[in-house]
Amino acid sequence: MDELTKSIVTRGDLAHLALFLWASGATGLLAWSLKELVAANRRFNDFVKEIATLNQLFRNRE
């Protein structure tokens, strides 16, 4: 990685390196956010299923 960085700096493409690092970070953050959103959706779905099960249980008791 050191040779790649030296090559970019000597050619004057520091802006391209900064843009690449920003885009990589943004993409990683998006992937992490989507993974967390899927997990939260799964937990909420499990919660709703449990509430439906409890409602069915209480309906059958009456």
Image: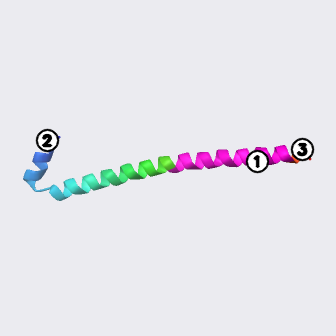
Q: What type of secondary structure mainly makes up the magenta span?
A: helix
Q: Earlier in the sequence, mark 3 or mark 2?
A: 2
Mark carried by residue 2: 2
Q: Kindly identify the amino acid type of the residue bearing the numbered disc 2.
A: Asp
Q: Earlier in the sequence, mark 1 or mark 3?
A: 1
Residue positioned 72% across, 44% down in the render: 50
Instruction: Specify the segment rendered in magenta.
Output: 37-58
Q: Kindly identify the amino acid type of the residue bearing the numbered disc 3.
A: Arg
Q: Can you tell which of label 3 and label 2 is closer to the viewer?
A: 3
Query: In the image, residue 16 lies at what x, y percent?
Result: 20, 56
Query: In the image, residue 45 lies at what x, y percent?
Result: 65, 47
User: Tag 2, which secondary structure?
Assistant: helix
Q: CA distance from mark 1 to mark 3?
A: 14 Å
Q: Quadrant of the N terminus?
A: top left
Q: CA distance from mark 3 to mark 2?
A: 71 Å
Q: CA distance from mark 2 to mark 1?
A: 58 Å
Inspect the magenta stretch and tell me whether residue 13 lies in it: no
Residue positioned 20% across, 53% down in the render: 17
Q: Kindly identify the amino acid type of the residue bearing the numbered disc 1.
A: Ala
**Of the pair 50 and 22, the residue shown nearer to us:** 50
Is residue 53 rendered to the left or right of residue 18?
A: right
Mark carried by residue 61: 3
Which residue in the rendered view is the most extreme toward the bottom?
Answer: 15
Q: Earlier in the sequence, mark 2 or mark 1?
A: 2
Inspect the magenta stretch and tell me whether residue 57 lies in it: yes
The residue labelled by disc 1 is 52
Residue positioned 26% across, 52% down in the render: 21
